Structure formats: C-alpha cells, structure tokens
Amino acid sequence: MSAIITLSLLAVLLLYLGLFKAKKALLPVSLLGLLAAIVLYSIQWDTDAEPLYSGMVLFDHFAVAFSILSLFITGLVFLLSRDYFDSISEHVAEYYALIIFSLTGALLVVSFHNLAMLFIGIEIMSVALYILVGIRKRDFSSNEAALKYFLMGAFSTGFLLFGITLIYGATGSFDLTEIKNYLIANPHSISPLFYSGILLLIIGLSFKVGAAPFHFWTPDVYEGAPILITTFMSTVVKTAAFAGFLRLFLTCFVPLQDFWAPVLLVITVLTLFIGNISALAQQSFKRMLAYSSISHAGYMLFGILSIGAASAGAIFVYSAAYSIASVVAFAVLILVKRSRGSEHFEAFNGLAAKNPYLAFTLSVAMLSLAGIPLTAGFVGKFMMFSGVLANYHIVLLLLAVLNAAMGIYYYFRVIVAMYFRPADREEVTVNANYKAVLFIGALLTIAIGIFPSLLAGWL
Amino acid sequence: MSVFYFVAFLSIFFALMTIFTKNAVHSVLYLVITFFTFTIHYILLNAQFLAVVNFIVYMGAIMVLFLFVLMLLNLNKDTEPLKSNLIKIIGVIAGLCLVVTIAGSLKLLETSNPVVLKDPGIGLVSNLGKVLFSEFLLPFEISSILLLTAMVGAVLLAKNETKKI
C-alpha cells in the first residue's frame, strides 16, 4: 500500500514542479519515484499476504509481480519521454502526473480483493488515458481517438458495473473470498443473476483488454494517440487489465468453468483471427502493431481459458515479453517517424545500413513478438500453449499455431524492409535515453529467451 | 399502498408522455417529472440517500444539462434527417426483441413476500456513512485520486495552448 501512496504523492509533487517551472527535474523525480515504489514492493515480497483494509486489497505474490512489471515498463516509457512531450505542448508536468495516476489505477487493478476496488482502479486507469489520448488538441485523429475511447470506455464501464451489481445481488458481497465461498456453499442452487453477472463482466473486461468482438476501438485509438501514450496503453494498461481479469476468474469463478469457458473460447478464437488477418493487410507500422496487440490479447486469453495454477505464471511471462518487445518497437517507431515523418513500412527501408543498432534491436523485438525461439516471446507462447495442451484443446492449439505463422509473416515485413530494401536516407539521431531503453529491451528479451527461469520462477 | 399506485400511475403516464411528445424540450421536461416520481418511490421504499441523490444529481444536474444541449442544438423539423425504411424496420425488430425479453422475464416473475425490512435503517444516510467510513474507507479515499485525475484532465483540456504545433 505504501507504494500506491508514494505514487499518488509523486503525481501531486510533479504537478507542483510544473507549477514552479522546474521542467528539468520532472523526469529524474518521476524515475526516482518509480524506483522507490519498486523497492517498496520488493520489500513486501516475502511477507505473508493478508487482505488489507477490511479485505479491499491483497498484496500477494501475484499482485507484487505484476505491479513491479507495470512499474518497470512505465519507467522505460518515461525514459522515452525525453523531448517527446515538449513538441506537443508546454504542460509537460501534467502529462507525467496523468501517466502516474493511470499507473496507480493499474496497480490497484492488479491487487484488488474487492470488486469495488476493481471498479475504482479501472476507472482511475481509464480516465487518465481518455485525456492522454487526446492531448494533441489540434490533431483531428487524436481528437477522434479520444472521443471514441471515452465513449467506448464509458459504455464498457457500464457493462462492468452492471455485472458487479448482479454478482452482488446474488452473493450479497463484493469481497472475492465471500463470492468464492458462496459458489462453494451452493454448488447446485446458484442464482441466475450470478450467471448474467459473469457474462457482463466478461463483456466489460474484454472491452478493456481489447478482445474481439469488442476490439473495434483499439486500432483507431492506438493509431490516433501520440505514440508514447500508445506504448503505455498497449503495455502497462493491457497487462494490468489482464492481471485483473485473471485474478477475478482465478479466485472466484473457477468452479463455474464449464459455464464461461465456451464463451471465452469463442472470444479467444475471434480475437486471434481478427487481429492477425487485419494485421496482414496493414501498410502502417503503427496500425499493424495495434492489430498485433489485439492478436496478443487473444494469446493471453489462453491463460484464462486454461485456468489453473500455472496460468498466472504464463500470463506474467507472456505480458512481460510482449510489453518489453512493444516498448522497443514503439521506441524505434518514434525515432523513424521523427526523421521521416511517416509511420509506413517504407519509412523503414534501408534502416539497417545507416543505423545497424536500431535495426538490430527492432529485429530482436519483432522476433520476440513473432515468438521465435531464443527470445522472450517464444517462452511466453510456449507456456501459454502448454497450458492449453494440458487441457486437451487440440483444435484450439492448431488454430493458435496457424495464427502464429500469420504473425511471423507481418512481423518479418519490417525486418525485410530494414535489411533488404535499400533506400537513400540519413542516419537517424538517437539520444542516450533511447539507446539505453533499446539496449535494456533487447538484452532482457534475449536473456529471458535463454534463461526463462529468470521470470518463470516468480509466480 | 394507494400512494404507491398513484405515484406508479404518474410515473408510467409521464414516461409515456416523454416518448409521445413531438417537441424535444417538452419531452425532457416530462422526463424530469418522471424522475421526480422515482424520487417519491425511493422515499416510499425507505431509501433516503438514493432519493436525495436522484433528486440532486439526475433531476438537478443531468437533466438540466440535457435541456441546455437540446436548446443549443436547435432541433426542429427542417434539420431532422429522414429515416429510411430500413432503420424503421430495424427499430421495430429491436423493439419486439425487448417485448419478448420482458414477456420472458414476466413469466419467471414470482410474487415476493410483502416488503418487510429486516433492518429498518438500511437506506438511511447515517448508516451509509458508517459503512463508508469503516468498511469501505479505502475505496472512498482512493476515489479522491479519481476525482483529482478528472480535475487535472479537465483543466488540461480546457487550457489554451500558447505554443502552436
């Protein structure tokens, strides 16, 4: 809890720094704050986790691991933010504060133990994002993205809230343990309200994680938002939403698996196919990444579908691999867009000749996203698929492999463009922060790929 | 009981008026009255807090916002887009779906026991406050972050940018 309080105070401190025009101090102070939060979480690792504040939050290993991952990825995003927000507007401090607020919401979502906290966490996370998406006030696509995200988000929140209400109506409690006890105590006389509640919760959460058929806001919002915000959304927010999704289903709804698994199965298959097939047709790298993030949501749903003791670890490794690779990909995209002014695949032509370092790190990221062995993405996919195989969903596994093959095609397009399509271009200037992020990203991707136990042992 | 039937009649009557009036502003005004009858229902059900919130937030704030938007939009017959037959058919289908749903749920309906409150103080403001400041203290405090976020965001969006992009 002390980490969440630290972060809230950090955001307020950043607002004050903005008031006193201390722009230089923003980035170091926020990074220090994130570091402090990581330290505070790591101290909690070995202590016995008990629900705190009359059962509102629970900082068990699951919560701590996902929190540290979110904090770490946010740190990487912050490192990329040097000089980035200055080009958009002069109110830089507010953007840092909003990202920190959104992160606070994400941390609440991964550590909730009461549906009221889940709701408040998701709201804090989303409200900050609605604004961040629309910070380019004079850019129409940014405005469109913000409005679309806001309307869709508000709509999906309605579903989520209605689901929570129905579950409360059936069980008389918001507390996860109480809900679980209700299910165990009445295995044969579960109120019909409870079933409708689960369905509505699935709809609401699918909206938030961007799973088909509730994905339609994702491509436009990811494309319209500033790239850095897209990075934050597709990594931290997605990870947190999945962690919340999994935590809810893992603690409460396992006894009713026969009821919700078919629904989730349909959602998973749709998500995989829609994400991958649409990604094949894209010409813009950013939009391709948006669709690929939908398809990755499909893979992550496997973890919830084959729910069990191993699924937390699988989702953790998968989201870590996916987030790190995405940060690298978006970082290179920011640099390329800055020099060429375009997000299309052609803008990457000949990058390898002038910037071998950039091209190499982006290739590592793409290989990881595609799930090639010796990268983190492979380990993540392997853990997901073995979970599915353990439940004998052979057909699902075949579909997933087919989709992974499609993924390889569009991820390799950018590698081909960089290495085999010569083009006249100037060298892209890379500042030290970007170099550091690319280095950390590529190193971690390969390190996790070779030594999976680095992460897999956490959960 | 007679009060309930009278107020229920008023609710349904004004709800129907909301749908059937041609003038949009009148329609909103009828909706305000409908919400007011809801407030009376809440008081009859001993839900003080809900009644007050419904009265202040829905009737007071949101419906006035509705009215303002409607007046700014300046709706009249000329600006109304022509609805194609397809849309009308879809509307009829959607409406019939709703009827089927309502009929289905009415079939499942049982008469509940006469409402006898186990805890007569359940809807009172003081009890709500006690729960809010004991069991639900953390969500209550955390919502301050939500409000602060929304406030910062609103100011940020409304502020004039001096630097052109």
Image: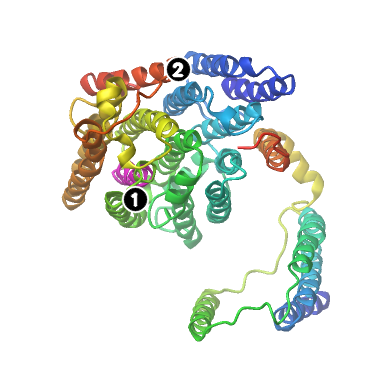
Which chain is indicated by disc 2? A
Would residue A293 appear left or right of A402 to someone viewing this image?
right
> Farthest residue in the front direction?
A424
Q: Do we see residue A136 in this rendering?
A: yes
Q: How far apart are marks 2 and 1 (CA)?
A: 46 Å
- Disc 1 crowd rating (10 Å Cα; few below 14, some 14-19, many 20+) is few
Dot placed on the residue nearer the N-terminal end, 2 or 1: 1
Q: Which mark is residue A433?
A: 2
Q: Is residue A377 visible?
A: no
Q: In this view, does A17 lie above or below B135?
A: above
* Region of the chain picked out in magenta, as a range: A289-306
Q: In which quarter of the image is the C terminus of chain A?
A: top left
- Residue A209 spot, x, y in % from top left: 43, 45
- Mark closer to the observer (2, 1): 2
Q: Is residue A384 left or right of residue B132?
A: left
Placement of A143 over or under B76, stated as above or below: above
- The amino acid beneath tag 1 is Gln
Residue A378 quadrant: top left
Q: Does the magenta stretch include residue A223?
A: no
Q: Is mark 1 on a helix, strand or loop?
A: helix
Relative placement, left or right, of A312 versus B71 is: left
**Total residue callouts:** 2
Residue at mark 2 shares a chain with residue at mark 1: yes
At x 18%, y 44%, the residue is A405
Out of A221 and A323, give the one closest to the viewer.
Answer: A221
Question: Is A291 within the magenta?
Answer: yes
Q: Helix, strand or loop at disc 2?
A: helix
**Front position in the image: B24 or B163:** B163
Which residue in the structure is indicated by mark 1?
A257
Tag 2 near tag 1, CB within 8 Å: no
Q: Is the magenta stretch mostly helix, strand or loop?
A: helix
